[in-house]
């Protein structure tokens, strides 16, 4: 038991404690970035922290998409279900803040280009047989993020809430028998 507990990485347990995408649900993958903060989240696409706040006040779930985030975006990050950035990595502002707040984040999604003036993001620059294929996603479109894999989907993909049961419950029980630190 002790060896089993020692072999499990803490970040693996953290990932299990976040919602995931329903594995049987259909999905349309539109981009892939870095898995910056685990979990899954969906919402209507917004491109500024102020828009995120306004939409959240109406009860709408939002995904905040930025080229990169800065400390001035914190009020939008706070109300967003998830964060999507075109630049950055696993130690970027968006990633660190999202992990600290327990929010899903896909960072460094270099396939997307955000046009704040047009309120849209363009995905794809691949050239196939002299044809450039691009997908334009407008503000308000519903997108789903998988922060555990770094995938971005167009449309609503159902999520499965995290649960502590089965093997995880057994592992946590075993861990309790070896812990030294007491938490109230």
Image: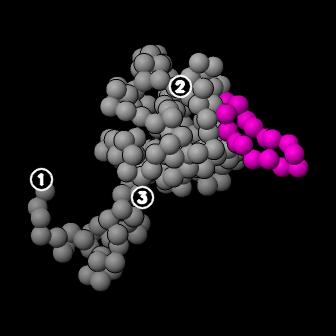
> Against 148, is 2 above or below?
below
Residue placed most toward the observer, 71 or 31? 71
Residue 169 vs residue 64: left or right? left
Percent of width and height locating residue 26: 70, 47
- Residue shown at 34% from the left, 46% from the top: 96
Lower sequence index among marks 1 and 3: 3
> Against 171, is 87 above or below?
above
Percent of width and height locating residue 166: 41, 66
Residue placed most toward the observer, 122 or 157? 122
Image disc number at residue 116: none
- Secondary structure under the numbered disc 2 in the rendered image: strand
Q: Are marks 3 and 2 in contact (CB under 8 Å)?
A: no
Of badges 1 and 3, the one in the foreground is 3
Percent of width and height locating residue 83: 47, 38
Image quarter hosting the N terminus:
bottom left
Magenta-drawn stretch contains 123: yes
Asked which quadrant contains residue 155, the reply is top right
The segment highlighted magenta reads: 122-137
Within 10 Å of disc 2 (Cα), the crowding (few <14, some 14-19, many 20+) is many
In the picture of the structure, the residue carrying the numbered disc 1 is 184
Of badges 3 and 2, the one in the foreground is 2
In the picture of the structure, the residue carrying the numbered disc 3 is 16
Lower sequence index among marks 3 and 2: 3
- Secondary structure under the numbered disc 1 in the rendered image: loop
In the picture of the structure, the residue carrying the numbered disc 2 is 46
- Residue shown at 73% from the left, 35% from the top: 135
Magenta-drawn stretch contains 95: no
Residue 180 vs residue 43: left or right? left
> Against 16, is 19 above or below?
above
Q: Are marks 2 and 1 in contact (CB under 8 Å)?
A: no
Could you give the CA–CA distance between mark 3 and mark 2, rounded to whole angstroms?
A: 28 Å
């Amino acid at each position: 038991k002790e060896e089993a507990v020692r072999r499990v990485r803490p970040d693996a347990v953290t990932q299990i404690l976040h919602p995931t995408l329903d594995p049987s649900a259909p999905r349309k993958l539109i981009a892939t970035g870095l898995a910056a903060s685990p979990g899954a989240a969906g919402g209507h696409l917004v491109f500024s922290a102020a828009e995120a706040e306004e939409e959240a006040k109406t009860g709408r779930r939002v995904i905040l998409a930025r080229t990169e985030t800065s400390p001035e975006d914190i009020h939008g990050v706070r109300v967003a279900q998830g964060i999507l950035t075109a630049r950055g990595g696993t130690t970027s502002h968006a990633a660190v803040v999202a992990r600290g707040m327990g929010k899903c984040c896909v960072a460094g999604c270099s396939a997307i280009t955000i046009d704040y003036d047009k309120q849209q993001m363009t995905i794809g620059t691949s050239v196939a047989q002299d044809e450039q294929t691009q997908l334009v996603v407008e503000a308000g479109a519903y997108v789903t993020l998988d922060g555990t894999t770094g995938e971005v989907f167009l449309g609503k993909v159902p999520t499965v809430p995290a649960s502590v049961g089965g093997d995880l419950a057994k592992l946590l029980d075993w861990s309790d028998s070896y812990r030294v630190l007491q938490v109230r």
